[in-house]
Image (cartoon, coloured by chain):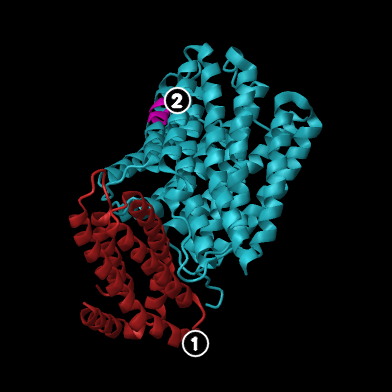
Chain colours: A red, B cyan
């Protein structure tokens, strides 16, 4: 994991892996889904905290722009957490239709967000912050272990 | 750096005007097919078939793909189209009217309609290609999808330029057409533009939305470029009549079929390895589309050794256009439309209020029902090549499928409209 792109992209795939486990099938086992969902949720919040506490501030400092792409990324993080909250509510009510509809919406939001980060924001961060990449990855690992 | 935009631009109405008018063309095609009846497949050069083909390629498929590209450029490429709302309006209107005029002109309603269609489409497609190329040129990163999109746009430019030459010859305005232009026009339009764009976009959407492994980099690195290069070599060898060119022409044609079959096989394999448990209408559309592409490649190969096979070109056209491209476009619409409605509504709602989720915007069972009607129409059209009388139920099914698609998409857009109106009234 020598670059920000590799490090955070691998973490995206980790979140995807947990998401797949948290989707409902025809006969949902709510206990299992709850367990899988909480793994997904903690992977997701861990990922957000690495970005919001380490990568975005470094990016903003370099570009001198707080209102640029990172602001949009933060807003989308907030929207995703909002959808997670709705999934929790649906899970409590064991409402399969609501749960799978919100999960579908979350997946598309999550993935179009990932495309923007993986195709544009991360490669740019690697270029702009090339002198600090190792240090930043180290900070992100610390931030993520503090989170979990 | 300051040009980098990562928001959900453009505004919702820019892509939606394309998506919501496109199904109209499917209904138009069904009407023409019903009118022609059992005589429809007699000649691939009949006015009806020329009109039907262009209503499908320019009307339903390219129009949807253009709308999707205007939407996707900021997301996938990080470089939005400038003044997108006004530009989308101009492109859409001239594309819509141009396609109708061109189709009526080809159908046999007169040279004036043909000329008007070509003029309007030149404006629409020229502007679309210009703004897309401008946006791609400013992309901060050059990855496989950016390159594939560039190759696809270049192919569209070739296909369209050849199309102008062909239409000009038909209307008697000029005659610089050689027979090989027709095959080149089809190949650049179908394989280069539609196939190329679908391949480039699949690199992003297949792994991410179906949670499959990524496409192997050893394929994505060269496939888009190879397709474009092979089309070039295939065109040149088809045009020149020097010793050995026919043999090379066949070889390049077979290599093109191999590239497309490779894409279909790899995509089917990735989807087989998907981690999502859910199997919805979109995934069914992908499966129908990829199998149609594989069969189309097989037909193409057989055609090289058996050029006298009757109806083979029509069979190829149905499989590639109505099977492969139409299926994938519909599958994508079922994700793009509800997501954009949800996203634009949710962004406007005050904290604590929720927009309807994607599956409330288009119900699974509605999408599934439309998919089944579409599949019936596809199988029916293929069978009608053997039993011409089947054209009637098949064309009818195609029309019904178009109407159902339209209803499903309009239903989601309608929910946006009503919720948005409530929102603006309450503030």
Residue B137 horizontal/vertical position (percent)? 56, 64
Label 2 marks a residue whose chain is B
- Relative to A9, residue B259 above or below: above
Which numbered dot is residue B376? Answer: 2
Q: Is residue B172 left or right of residue B161?
A: right
Residue B52 horizontal/vertical position (percent)? 62, 28
- Relative to B31, residue B3 above or below: below
For residue B121, which quarter of the picture?
top right
Residue B83 horizontal/vertical position (percent)? 66, 64
Query: Is disc 1 in contact with disc 2, using a CB cutoff of under 8 Å?
Result: no
Comparing B47 with A78, the one in front is A78
Instruction: Give the residue pinned by disc 1.
Output: A64
Q: Residue at x 49, y 46 (%)?
A: B333
Quarter occupied by the C terminus of chain B: bottom right
Residue A80 in sight from this viewpoint? yes
Q: Residue at x 78, y 33 (%)?
A: B113
What secondary structure predominates along the stretch shown in magenta?
helix
Element at badge 1? loop
**Structural distance between the alpha carbons of marks 1 and 2:** 57 Å
Mark 2 residue crowding within 10 angstroms, few (<14) / some (14–19) / many (20+): some
What is the magenta range?
B295-300
Looking at the image, is mark 1 or mark 2 nearer the viewer? 2
Q: Residue furthest right?
A: B112
Residue B229 in sight from this viewpoint? no
Q: Is residue A83 left or right of residue B125?
A: left
For residue B38, which quarter of the picture?
top right
Comparing B187 with B24, the one in front is B24
């Amino acid at each position: 994991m020598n670059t920000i792109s590799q490090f955070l992209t691998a973490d995206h795939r980790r979140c995807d892996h947990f998401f797949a486990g948290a989707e409902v099938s025809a006969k949902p086992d709510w206990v299992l889904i709850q367990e899988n969902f909480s793994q997904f949720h903690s992977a997701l919040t861990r990922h957000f905290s690495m970005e919001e506490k380490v990568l975005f501030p470094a990016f903003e400092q370099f570009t001198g722009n707080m209102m640029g792409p990172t602001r949009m990324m933060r807003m989308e993080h907030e929207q995703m957490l909002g959808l997670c909250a709705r999934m929790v509510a649906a899970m409590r009510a064991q409402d399969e239709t609501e749960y799978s509809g919100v999960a579908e919406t979350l997946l598309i939001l999550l993935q179009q967000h990932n495309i923007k980060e993986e195709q544009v924001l991360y490669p740019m961060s690697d270029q702009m912050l090339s002198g600090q990449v190792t240090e930043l990855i180290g900070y992100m690992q610390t931030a993520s272990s503090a989170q979990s | 750096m300051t040009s980098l935009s990562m928001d959900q631009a453009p505004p919702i109405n820019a892509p939606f005007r394309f998506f919501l008018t496109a199904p109209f063309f499917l209904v138009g095609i069904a009407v023409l097919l019903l009118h022609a009846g059992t005589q429809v497949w007699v000649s691939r050069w009949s006015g009806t078939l020329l009109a039907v083909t262009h209503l499908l390629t320019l009307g339903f498929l390219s129009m949807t793909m253009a709308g999707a590209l205007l939407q996707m450029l900021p997301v996938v490429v990080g470089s939005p189209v400038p003044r997108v709302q006004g530009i989308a309006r101009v492109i859409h209107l001239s594309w819509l009217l141009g396609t109708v005029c061109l189709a009526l002109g080809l159908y046999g309603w007169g040279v004036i309609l043909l000329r008007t269609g070509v003029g309007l489409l030149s404006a629409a497609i020229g502007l679309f290609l210009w703004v897309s190329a401008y946006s791609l040129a400013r992309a901060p990163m050059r990855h496989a999808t950016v390159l594939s999109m560039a190759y696809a746009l270049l192919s569209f430019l070739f296909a369209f330029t050849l199309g102008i030459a062909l239409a000009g010859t038909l209307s008697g305005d000029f005659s610089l057409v050689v027979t090989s232009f027709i095959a080149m026009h089809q190949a650049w339009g179908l394989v280069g533009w539609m196939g190329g764009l679908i391949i480039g976009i699949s690199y992003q959407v297949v792994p991410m939305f179906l949670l499959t492994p990524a496409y192997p980099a050893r394929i994505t690195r060269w496939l888009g470029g190879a397709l474009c290069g092979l089309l070039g070599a295939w065109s040149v060898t088809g045009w020149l009549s020097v010793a050995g060119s026919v043999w090379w022409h066949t070889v390049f044609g077979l290599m093109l079929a191999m590239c497309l079959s490779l894409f279909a096989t790899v995509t089917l394999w990735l989807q087989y390895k998907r981690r999502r448990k859910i199997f919805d209408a979109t995934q069914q559309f992908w499966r129908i589309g990829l199998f149609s592409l594989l069969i189309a490649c097989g037909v193409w190969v057989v055609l090289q050794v058996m050029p006298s096979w009757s109806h083979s070109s029509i069979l190829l056209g149905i499989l590639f256009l109505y099977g492969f491209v139409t299926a994938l476009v519909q599958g994508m619409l079922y994700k793009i439309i509800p997501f954009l409605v949800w996203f634009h509504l949710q962004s406007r709602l005050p904290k604590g209020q929720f927009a309807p989720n994607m599956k409330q915007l288009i119900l699974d069972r509605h999408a599934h029902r439309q998919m089944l009607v579409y599949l019936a129409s596809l199988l029916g059209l293929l069978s009608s090549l053997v039993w011409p009388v089947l054209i009637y139920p098949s064309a009818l099914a195609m029309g019904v499928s178009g109407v159902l698609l339209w209803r499903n998409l309009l239903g989601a857009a309608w929910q946006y409209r009503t919720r948005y109106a409530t929102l603006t009234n309450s503030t």
